[in-house]
Image: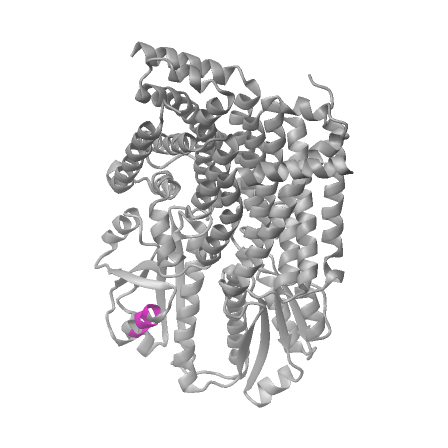
Amino acid sequence: MRQFTSFIKKEFYHIFRDRRTLFILLGMPVIQIVIFGFALTNEVKNAKIAVLDQSKDVASIALLDEFNASRYFDIEKNLTSYNEIEPAFKAGKIKMIIVIPSSFGEELKHLNKAQVQLIADASDPNVANTLTNYASAIIMDYQARITQERKLPYTIKAEFRMLYNPQMKGAYNFVPGVMAMVLLLVCTMMTAITIVKEKEMGTMEIMLVSPVRPILVVVAKAVPYLVLSIVNIISILLLSVYVLEVPINGSIPLLMGVSILFILVSLALGLLISAATDTQQTAMFISLIALFLPTVMLSGFMFPVENMPFPLRTVSNIVPAKWYYFIVKSVMIKGLGFSSIIKEVAILTGMLVFFLLMAVKKFKIRLA
Amino acid sequence: MRTLKFLLQKEFRQIFRDPSILRLIFVMPIIQLMVLPWAADYEIKNIKLAIVDHDHSTYSQQLISKITAGGYFQLSGDPVSYDAALKLVEREEADLVLEIPSHFEKDLVKEDEITVFMALNAINGVKANLGGSYLRTILQDFNREVRLKWVQFPRFNPDTQVEVVSSNWYNPLMNYKYFMVPGILVLLLTMIGANLTAINIVREKEIGTIEQINVTPIRKSHFILGKLIPFWVLGMLVLTLGFIIARLAYGIIPVGSFLTIYAFAAIYLLAVLGLGLLISTYSSTQQQAMLVSFFLMMIFILLGGLYTSIESMPLWAQYITKLNPVSYFIDVMRMVVLKGSGIGDIKRQLLVITGFALLFNGWAVWSYRKRS
């Protein structure tokens, strides 16, 4: 045991003596959580749109005023003919064009029925979809306002309540996601690389001939990163509460507990990668390039998992971040207790055991 | 010129003698391009709706069947109370709750007015918004049908109707893959290029082989060029491979010309590789280089405009994206592949990226020191 602790001490020296790395390790999550917490949002705000108003009467101006007042749209340009639509889109910045036919006001006045055309730039289908929906909602409100003045019989009204995130802040969705991503990648990459580095430099040989059991040698390498990651979680949580104003509604010890479990999973994955690779370059390639995009795209915080085709939904189950993201959302934002995350915790524990067993099996105590 | 030739020979040999990394460079993008675009479906189908029907009347039944017939909503469970429905939301088995009050039918007919209650899981704001607005549209249609049954309006229908006709240009079928495949290709290209060059020079430092180069009369710019060109060639190959997959697996053929894309990509790669080399010259261990490039990659990729739109970001973040090479390439890809924009349309992006390329590479040459 004493030998093991002295190995851990050695690893701490390793880290503390490389000030630059230490600084990045502790500073990176802080900067990222702040940037992403503020900047990432699925909402589309201040989208630049253009208007082709052929009617130019009281009704059409009133409708466009509604668009102007909305925080989703910025009317950037007034077009005068259909021929200007194509160039406006091609120049890039205009996302949608509202076309009001010349008969708009007249028809509304006489038939109480009119038409508006929305043309969206669907080269980004997500934005196009969202904007069309926002615009339809605005037009619906406009129409409801006219109707309301007349007080129609048999009216069904709807009352809305936004659960968990009444201000609809993007951070509620992205803070748990970024937490999962940063922890997973940093832990996996750093353990994988420090161990492979010893192999590459030849110092692994020296450690393997020490009286400590070989597997403890590599476990000792992971311990400092566990400590650093706990510091990171604390700083991320402090920032999200005090800077991003995302509350922790559930139990903090529970949140810390599951986060430590997730860190252990990531560290174990790092050990496994290190056992399977020989150069830092390969280790980095696998832990960064192979893990990054799948984690972003399959963990559910960018794209809803239930929309994916079945095979991919199955694949997403092996992404550890998916389960942690669900847990953080449940505990931190919804304020649920342990009983509602048992399944997810069990899955993460299973992954931890699996990665560790695989790492031990793959770990070679003999040199090639 | 001759020294450069020898340097290139050395670098290429180094790359080809590590087949495991070479395999990764080509296999990884193929796999990710085949798999990931399928995940990127933003269209909200299958919104899970829990309906609490306290009324159990003909009208409430009609409303429910109208909602399910629309195709957007999937009923989840049959909760008897609002609390039971909330439990479903907690377990992520429902995104929306619709509560139909008792006396729904009676009050609607007798009192002329009734309020239904909706609760939306707003953690993912877009889903909540879209689900809510679909549901409102259905309610409105239903309302109109009920009204028609009871009242015979005169020719001037007091119920105002502004019909919305929407069309989606450039991608009328709303195929997400047209947008995601080129975008993901850009991300992969950037990650591979920047990461490989970022650890390349520092690797020579760590192993000690850089000393051998430093004692030769090789010029600094030749050294950097020697590192740059092989990875540039690899990058262009990965890009070509990516377009072949886009063509074969997804049937994506750029509307604009390949020439425009390759012209931009050629300069873009120089910029990204230059950034990698710059990181490398400043780092003293591979670990440092990786951490820095990982940090930058994460910001570049998440703020690149592929996943979330840049216009919705706060102003300061939009300024950050101006320094983000990835956002320019994603912009260009979208314009050329989907809208058929030509060189003239992407002048600005081309200019900026050329600036980046000159800056990063010049800086890398300048900061590379032969003395330790």
- In the image, farthest residue toward the left: A80
Quadrant where the C terminus of chain A is found in the figure:
top right
Which residue is more in the foreground, A224 or B168? A224
B38 is higher (above) or lower (below) than B166: above
Query: In the image, residue B144 lies at what x, y percent?
Result: 50, 76
Q: Is residue B96 magenta?
A: no
In the displayed structure image, the side of residue A111 where residue B14 appears, left or right: right
Q: Residue at x 67, y 22 (%)?
A: A205
Whether residue A120 is visible here, answered yes or no, is no
B130 relative position to B360: left or right? right
Of residues A121 and A182, the one drawn nearer to the viewer in this rendering: A182
Please tell me in which quadrant of the rendered image residue B8 appears: top left
The prevailing secondary structure element of the residues shown in magenta is helix
Comparing A238 with B355, the one in front is: A238
What x and y, as percent, mark residue B45? 57, 55
**Magenta range:** A62-68
Residue depicted at x 52% and y 65%: A242
Total marks drawn? 0
Q: Is residue A93 left or right of residue A187?
A: left
Query: Eyeballing the image, is A173 above or below A150?
Result: above
Q: Is residue A285 above or below residue A19?
A: above
How far across and down, in percent of the image, does residue A279 sit?
A: 58, 24
Does the image show residue B131?
Answer: yes
- At a point 43% along the width and 71% down the height, the residue shown is A140
Residue A258 percent location from the top left of the image: 69, 54
Q: How is the image coloured?
A: one colour
Residue A64 shown in magenta: yes
**Along the line of sight, which residue is nearer the eye, A45 or A191?**
A191
